[in-house]
Image: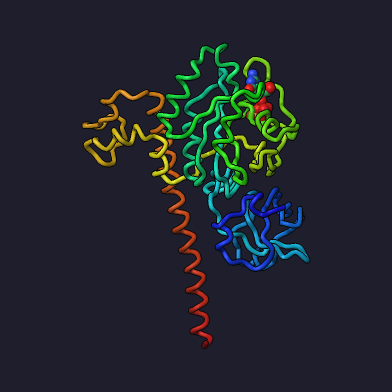
Amino acid sequence: MQLEKLGWNGFFASQARAGVPARVASATRERFLVWTEGGEVEASVSGQMRREGSAWPAVGDWVALRLDVPVIEQVFERKSVLSRKHPGRAMDEQVLATNIDALFIVSGLDRNFNERRIERYLVVARQSGARPVILLNKADLAGQYGVDLGEVVERLHHRCGAPVLALSAETGDGFEGLTDLLAPGETAALIGSSGVGKSTLVNRLLGQERQVTAEVRAGDSRGRHTTTVRSMFIMPSGQLLIDMPGLREVQLWASPNKLDASFEDVREIAEACRFRDCTHSGEPGCEIVAAGLDEDRLENYRKMQRELDYLDRKTDKRLMSEMRDRWKIIHKAMRKKTKDGW
Ligand code: GDP
């Protein structure tokens, strides 16, 4: 298998690393399935990497492999990192996948259609460094739910500044538009709420039944989760796909400035507000309130702004305290050395 077909490009080639280049196709805590030019290998992480506390390999990573053992000795610098706030631990980042070119934000055009969710995932995409692509699935149901497809596509495209494609994983309509959005050798990942049709989409993209599709629960048109494995696949048309089927909630892990790229309209108007740090919640001279923007959209913006500001403050505090602890150890060691003589 040529490395280029696995996503290898100049960005990675320019990083000199000893060992065989390989891409992580699936990752559990300790075991990694990696793809090399020579085929698939199961590997663990070298002792040195553990001691140094280097970045732990994630699905999508390019790694330097020592083949005879086989162990991963280094992780290449990442082109993009898809993260969320760790669902358990207080203020930690959890890396979901790396080196993604496009993040497909999937939404279903049924009664659960939720533009606020799309806005949230847009912030996640923009933080990751991958380009966001909005996929409006279940286009076959749009008429039934009174959705004007053309209008929704146009509106989202204008507001979100990302390509929008309406398709149906069930019927296969609209998929021809996808090839313009992802070239062979590029990598995409799918993100979206439960029940929007991600597994059905993956099945169609891969041309076979990779996922067990959950039946929609009666009454609420929401699907259930069936698996928790994360993995990478190659589509018959040559693009790579990272599937994260067990992903439930995605709490934001982003810097506050990533919000504005997904709310261009808000940002533009906000420049005229009287106060630079205007929160658009009723301050005098607020242009946003005067502009009469969609109230739900604005409230979502404010909510995420508060969330990201909080995250920013907390992570900053945590980093400061970690740094203080590290210096304490260094100072103690130095004092001991001075006392004992060097
Ligand atoms: P996931 O939770 O996002 O992986 O969603 P699933 O792929 O399990 O799909 C949830 C439900 O939506 C299933 O009953 C699918 O058959 C259905 N579904 C998925 N895509 C489409 C579509 O394009 N049109 C229609 N009508 N139903 C779909």
- Counting labels gives 0
Q: Is residue 277 left or right of residue 330?
A: left
Q: Which residue is drawn at the image coordinates 65% and 68% (left, top)?
A: 18
Residue 308, placed above or below residue 110 = below
Q: Position of residue 79 (x, y in %)?
A: 53, 52
Q: Is residue 124 above or below residue 283?
A: below
Q: Position of residue 301 (x, y in %)?
A: 40, 33
Ligand 1 quadrant assignment: top right
Question: Looking at the rendering, which quadrant does residue 244 occupy?
Answer: top right
User: Which residue lies most toward the bottom here?
Assistant: 341
Q: Is residue 98 left or right of residue 294?
A: right
Picture layout, residue 86 above or below residue 284: below
Question: Could you say which is closer to the camera, residue 101 or residue 318?
Answer: 101
Q: How is the image coloured?
A: rainbow
Residue 9: in sight, yes or no? yes
Left or right? Give the position of 219 relative to 329: right
Horizontally, is 320 left or right of 90 in the view?
left
* Residue closer to the observer: 184 or 320: 184
Residue at (29, 41) in percent of width and height: 277
Q: Is residue 223 visible?
A: no
Spot occupied by residue 286 in the image (x, y as percentages of width and height)? 25, 31
Percent of width and height locating residue 203? 70, 31
Residue at 54 percent of width and 37 percent of height: 181
